[in-house]
Image (cartoon, rainbow, N blue to C red):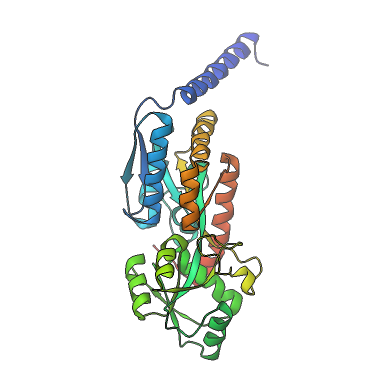
């Protein structure tokens, strides 16, 4: 049985620890914050990270410095953050690839996606768009499926790489519709898009925000989007779900994570900053123009969401047979 002295000492230690966590949350930040972007510059993840860094700098009164640590589809930068001090001064721009798909795509992971990071909150999410070359003889998803089924194995599709969300979006559609298509992986979105526009490949899924300007200019044609609802930026483009596949959803997302074991009060403090950013009128307007939705997820809901994404994309990865050592 514990003595009164031991109980008092234990209670005091717990009280001091909680007080320390609370003080850390109240004082944060007292210096610059590093925001690690685990993907190359100028892509969606980098652009979103720089937007958050700019807005967070305005709100917290300290500079938020973006640092690109690239490689292994986001694993290198994510692993760096997973091994950093949990003090709120090293944060990660996380997303569907590094915190969803990679869990199954890679045979060995350097960190645990769900428990090896603190999932603080989401910035925004948005669909992929199924797009075709303008000369391709299909104007709807139904017409596309009919063409493919009439000539099994004749058609191919591009992606930004094995295991990318746009690759797996097509794999999910292939499975749902019973299609026979050949996958042509590219090393990134730019070369894939160039070949699509030139007619070297007829179709692909692409991040909606990347598709919008090319669709509006007539360089590509959009047949469907992978969200459950249509997007304001291209309101005439139907969803895959309403085109014969109820419940079909495969969205990309961008979030902010931190090292494991961050104090709960500090996590909530940073989450509040992210929610304030998401509610800014200019941010909402920018997101709407790109077909993105701002998110107000709290940390516990964010963690649950990441677990669901690991499970959902894991099924698509296994169905595709894609693996990376």
Point 49% across, 26% down: residue: 25
- Pick whichever, 109 or 224, lies toward us: 224
Point 54% across, 56% down: residue: 310
Toward which corner of the image does residue 135 lie, by quadrant? bottom left
Percent from the top left, x then y, of residue 225?
54, 67
Residue occupying the far right of the picture = 1
Task: Say above or below: 162 vs 274.
Answer: below
- Pick whichever, 1 or 189, lies toward us: 189
Residue occupying the far bottom of the picture = 150
Question: In this rendering, does residue 190 appear at all?
Answer: yes
- Pick whichever, 241 or 117, lies toward us: 241
Point 49% across, 67% down: residue: 129
Question: In this rendering, does residue 79 appear at all?
Answer: no
Percent from the top left, x then y, of residue 201?
39, 79
Task: Say above or below: 67 vs 194.
Answer: above
Query: In the rendered image, which quarter contains the N terminus?
Result: top right
Toward which corner of the image does residue 242 lie, by quadrant? bottom right
Q: How many tags in the picture?
A: 0
Percent from the top left, x then y, of residue 183?
43, 77
Percent from the top left, x then y, of residue 283?
47, 46
Toward which corner of the image does residue 132 lie, by quadrant? bottom left
Task: Say above or below: 232 vs 9.
Answer: below
Question: Is 55 placed left or right of 294 in the picture?
Answer: left
Point 62% across, 73% down: residue: 243
Query: In the rendered image, which quarter contains the C terminus?
Result: bottom left
């Amino acid at each position: 049985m514990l003595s009164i002295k031991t109980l008092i000492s234990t209670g005091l230690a717990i009280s001091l620890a909680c007080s320390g966590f609370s003080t850390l949350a109240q004082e944060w930040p007292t210096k610059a914050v590093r925001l690690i972007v685990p993907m190359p510059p100028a892509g969606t993840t980098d652009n979103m990270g720089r937007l958050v860094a700019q807005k967070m700098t305005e709100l917290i009164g300290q500079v938020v410095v973006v640092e690109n640590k690239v490689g292994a589809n986001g694993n290198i930068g994510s692993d760096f953050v997973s091994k950093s001090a949990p003090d709120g001064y090293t944060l990660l721009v996380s997303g569907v690839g590094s915190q969803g798909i990679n869990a199954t795509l890679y045979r060995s992971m350097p960190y645990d996606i769900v428990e090896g990071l603190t999932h603080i909150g989401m910035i925004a999410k948005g669909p992929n768009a199924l797009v075709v070359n303008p000369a391709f003889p299909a104007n709807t998803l139904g017409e596309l499926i009919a063409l493919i089924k009439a000539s099994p194995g004749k058609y191919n599709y591009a992606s930004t790489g094995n295991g990318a969300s746009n690759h797996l979006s097509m794999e999910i559609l292939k499975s749902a519709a019973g299609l026979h298509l050949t996958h042509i992986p590219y090393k990134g979105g730019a070369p894939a898009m160039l070949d699509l526009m030139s007619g070297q490949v007829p179709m692909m899924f692409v991040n909606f925000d990347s598709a919008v300007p090319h669709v509006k200019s007539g360089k590509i044609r959009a047949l469907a989007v992978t969200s459950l609802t249509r997007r304001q930026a291209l309101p005439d483009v139907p969803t895959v779900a309403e085109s014969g596949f109820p419940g079909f959803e495969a969205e990309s997302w961008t979030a902010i994570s931190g090292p494991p074991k961050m104090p709960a009060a500090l996590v909530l403090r940073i989450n509040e900053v992210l929610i304030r950013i998401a509610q800014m009128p200019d941010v909402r307007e920018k997101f709407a123009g790109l077909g993105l939705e701002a998110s107000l997820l709290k940390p516990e809901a964010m963690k649950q969401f990441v677990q669901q994404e690991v499970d959902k994309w894991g099924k698509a990865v296994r169905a595709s047979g894609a693996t990376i050592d």
